[in-house]
Amino acid sequence: MNVPDIIIAIDGYSSTGKSSFAKLVAKKFDFLYLDSGALYRGVTLFAREEGLISEGNVIDPLLEERLAGLDLHFNAEGKLCTGERCIEKEIRSMEVSSQVSPIAAVPYVRAFVDEKLREYGRKGRIVMDGRDIGTAVFPNAELKIFMTASEEVRAQRRFDELVSKGENPTLEDVVKNLRDRDYIDSHRETNPLRRADDAYGLDNTEMGFTEELAWIQGLIQGKFGIL
Ligand code: CDP
C-alpha cells in the first residue's frame, strides 16, 4: 500500500498499546516511529539521577536550567540515549513510571520535549504516540487515532511487560500506577490528555496485531483513496 507522506498521531491512556501499534504501523508503511513518552521518561530519569525530584514528587525548580544541558536523542535504532548512554531499560522501570506524570505536567518540561518532537516531525512520514500529539504537538496531523482498552487488559499487558524485563511488580501496583497517571495526565493544565475532535477511536481490548493492522489499512484506504 502506497501511503502518502503524512503524520500519524496516536494518543490515548496509559498502556493501551500505543507504542506497539505505532511500531507496527511504522514497519508496515516504512514510517519513522517516535515515542514521545520516552522523552518524558528520559527527563524523569535525569531528574532522579540529579536529585532534582523527591520521593514525594516535589520537583526542584533547578530542573529548568539543568534541562538546557541535557542531551536526549533517539539513536538509529530508535532507542532513547543521553550522550553515548542508551537508557531504554531504565526509563521503563516502575520508579520512573511513578514519577513521570508529575514531571510531564510541568510547562517548561513540555516545552523542552515539544521542541524535540517538532524537530523530528519536520522529516514528515512519521508516526508518533503520546498524550497530546493530535491536540497540541501536531494539531494538523493528517491522521489522528485515539486508543483505549479495558483497564484489566491494560494492567495485565503492562504487568507482563515488566515481568519479562526482570522486574517484580504486583498487579495492584501496576493498576494504581495506570490510574494515577491517567488522572494526572487528563487533569493537568498544560495540554491535558483528551481525544481530538477529528481523531478516530480504536478500542483494542479484544484485538491482536493482525486486526489492528487491518483496521488502519482500511482507514487509510478510505480516507486517502488508496488501493
Ligand atoms: O506507559 P505508557 O506507554 O502508556 O506511557 P508513555 O507513553 O511511556 O508516557 C509516560 C508518561 O509521559 C505519561 O503517563 C504522561 O504523563 C507523559 N506523556 C505526556 O504527558 N505527553 C505525551 N505526549 C507522552 C507522554
Image: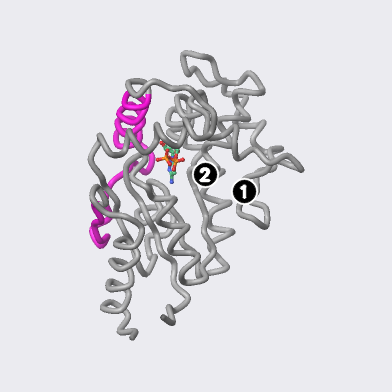
Residue 89 lies, in percent from the top left, at 59, 36
Quadrant (top left, top right, bottom left, bottom right) of the C terminus = bottom left
Q: Position of residue 42 (x, y in %)?
A: 58, 37
Side of 74 where 9 appears, left or right? left
In this figure, which residue is indicated by the disc labeled 1? 79
Residue under the point 68% across and 38% down = 70
The picture quadrant where one finds residue 212 is: bottom left
Label 1 Cα neighbours within 10 Å, binned few <14 / some 14-19 / many ≥20 = some
Q: Quadrant of ligand 1?
A: top left
Quarter holding the N terminus is bottom left
Residue 199 position, x and y percent, is 27, 60
Q: In terms of image quadrants, where is residue 166?
A: top right
Residue segment shown in magenta: 174-203
* Distance of label 2 from label 1 (alpha carbons): 21 Å
Discs 2/1, front: 1
* 157 vs 191, nearest the viewer: 157
Residue matched to label 2: 111
Residues at marks 2 and 1 touching, judged by CB atoms closer than 8 Å: no
Q: Secondary structure at mark 1?
A: loop
